[in-house]
Image: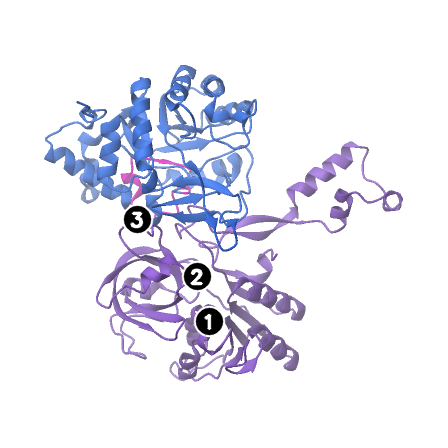
Amino acid sequence: MKTEPREVKGKIVNHRRISPEYYTLRIQAPEIARAARPGQFVMIRLDDTYDPLLRRPFGFSRILPPNQKRGGGFAEGGFEICYQVVGRGTARLTRLREGERADVLGPLGRGFWREEGRERLILVGGGIGIAPLLPWAEELGGRKAGTREVQPEILLGGRDAHRLLGVREIKRMGLEPQIATEDGSAGLRGTATDLLERDLLSKGDESKAIYACGPMPMLAKVAQIAEQFDVPCQVLLESRMACGVGACLGCAVKIRAEGKGEEEEEKENLSASKGGLCRPEEETEIPLPEEMAARISPAPNFRYGRVCLEGPVFRAQEILWE
Amino acid sequence: MRAGMKSRNDDSSLQIFLGSLKLKNPVMAASGTFGYGEEYAPLLPLRNLGAIVTKGLSLDPRKGNPPPRLAETPAGMLNAIGLENVGLKAFLREKLPRLRKFRCPIIVNIFGNSVEEYAEMARRLGDVEGISGLEVNISCPNLKAGGSLFAADPKSVFQVTAKIRQAAARFMMVKLSPNVADIGKIAQAAEEGGADAVSLINTLVGLAIDVRTRTPILANITGGLSGPAIKPVGLAMVWRVAQAVKVPVVGLGGITTAEDALEYLIAGATAVQVGCAHFFDPRAPLKIIDGISRYLKAQNLSDISSLVGSLKTK
């Protein structure tokens, strides 16, 4: 699942606006395409001036290994990313022209993987977060030499019809996505997590696994649903990043850790020094100070993990959701 | 080393001395921007670097600050990582053995929550094999010197340097904060305390605000500014310190190209560190080494030391 990254100058072979909100960029980079796995990402340097200074991370929305004339017949090999203009970096990205070269670092991070014994796979994407699920859908259920082992279910959500993507691509793979939009302009009125709950409630199947990408609140909800139905779940997280390779520790996310939190330990040491552990019946006789209240629902211990290196794909239960 | 792997980076004119420490070239990777080396190993041959300064290390592991920890600013970036690190034990057990395989001099950046903790770190690293020296970060935010910032107080800086000197005989450079009134005085305090070299500048305190929400972008509110934006500040301070002390000066702050590094050398730095540039240009240190080498040839200089502090001011 992990690969050695490299830095290459990739030729931009296609760049287009696919909806009022989203763009697709195809870059020729056979070295990266050969190694890339669904769920991994690249860091693209937007300009060789210092403003914007940092590279920007983008998940693969399509991986096109060399010599596999598929779809667009892209024999040289490369990949696609989808993006939404959210700031100065992505605004700069829109100005890249076909034929120009982009400095690409990748493939980076840990991609998606199959969960052992799980055959019924559900992919849940929200908004621009649908993009990195597309190569995973293609690998799992694409029309590859007629050997379709699994047929993933694809659940897509967006605020409105313009903030959906991948519908055509999914259909081209021979899969039928379920769609929800918050304003009802496409598919069901609701969210991708509504689709997920409905799916899990209606079909009792033991061998399910969930793969999700989208905004953080959506992923937290997906994680909660997965836990409730006891289904293994992988989430692809987004984060601000500087290096993309695990060196700067900038893209921190709270990861559940064994044992107690630091503050909890301090409190216990404190109470131990005051004469050992109180018996519960004694505790109820005194009003609960804040530290006692905290001990009843102790803060779980955590460490900061690096989204770029340990992720961007994590098991949902690894994350300390807040 | 295979003969075919010999490159311009073995150019002997680039060799420098920081006191007793000999480096094959003056370009190091700055602490906190290069992890423990292994993160960048797939992208560039680490043995070509002058040295690697490892991520700031404390006695006990530290979790670091909550995210967001990064904010991009014009030609720079703010970081508030919060000195997250694996702690001394895990460093010695897991990180150092892997790092040693890259056959690049290793300088271990250390910090503590008290003068005693610094000394303890130095003692425990004092005779560890496979490291070339220590860099002392005196800008730990938990350190106080009677209410004022430790790094800004010459007496405290002298004290911590002297304690570390007592605890370990090996090469030690003190990394100076630019957030002080007179960096020359702080450098002198480190020199008097027994530092073999000083490195500067650490990051400048900065703030970035989201005007829509009127909240700071960093969870820590303020962070340390690095990147090309701080280069002129670093140069001015290196120039000032180079006149104030006799020990070698290691310059850093916004170095991205060979020309930036040459500016630092001319201002008085014997060596330089590349920091933030790794993030957007991972091979920057190699390009800088090659660029310095080419410059020396073009200028007919056989020894880089003739360049150090050669600024013509009249």
Badge 3 and badge 2 both on one subunit: yes
Chain letter, blue: B
Q: Please rate how many residues cluster around mark 2, counting C-alpha atoms within 10 Å: few if below 14, some from 14 to 19, many from 20.
A: few
Q: Amino acid at mark 2?
A: Met
Magenta stretch, main secondary structure, is loop
The answer to whether A94 is drawn above or below residue A305 in the figure is below
Mark-to-mark CA distance, 1 and 2: 20 Å
Is B36 contained in the magenta span?
A: yes
Left or right, A187 with respect to B227, comes to right
Which secondary structure, mark 3?
loop
Which residue is label 1 attached to? Answer: A130
Q: Is residue B266 visible?
A: yes
Q: What residue sits 79% from the left and 42% below the top?
A: A289
* Residue nearer the viewer, B58 or B237: B237
Q: Quadrant of the image for the C terminus of chain A?
A: bottom right
Q: Position of residue A38 (x, y in %)?
A: 42, 67
Which secondary structure, mark 2?
loop
Mark-to-mark CA distance, 3 and 2: 33 Å
Q: Please rate how many residues cluster around mark 3, counting C-alpha atoms within 10 Å: few if below 14, some from 14 to 19, many from 20.
A: some
Q: Quadrant of the image for the N terminus of chain A?
A: bottom left
Please provide the residue range marked out in magenta. B35-54
Badge 1 and badge 3 both on one subunit: yes
Which residue is label 2 attached to? Answer: A1
Q: What residue sits 52% from the left and 60% below the top?
A: A314
Q: Amino acid at mark 3?
A: Tyr
- Looking at the image, how many numbered discs can be counted on the residues? 3
Q: Nearer the viewer, mark 1 or mark 2?
A: 1
Q: Please rate how many residues cluster around mark 1, counting C-alpha atoms within 10 Å: few if below 14, some from 14 to 19, many from 20.
A: many
Which residue is label 3 attached to? Answer: A50
Q: Examine the image and state in which quarter residue B179 appears.
A: top left
The answer to whether B313 is drawn above or below residue A289 in the figure is above
Chain letter, purple: A
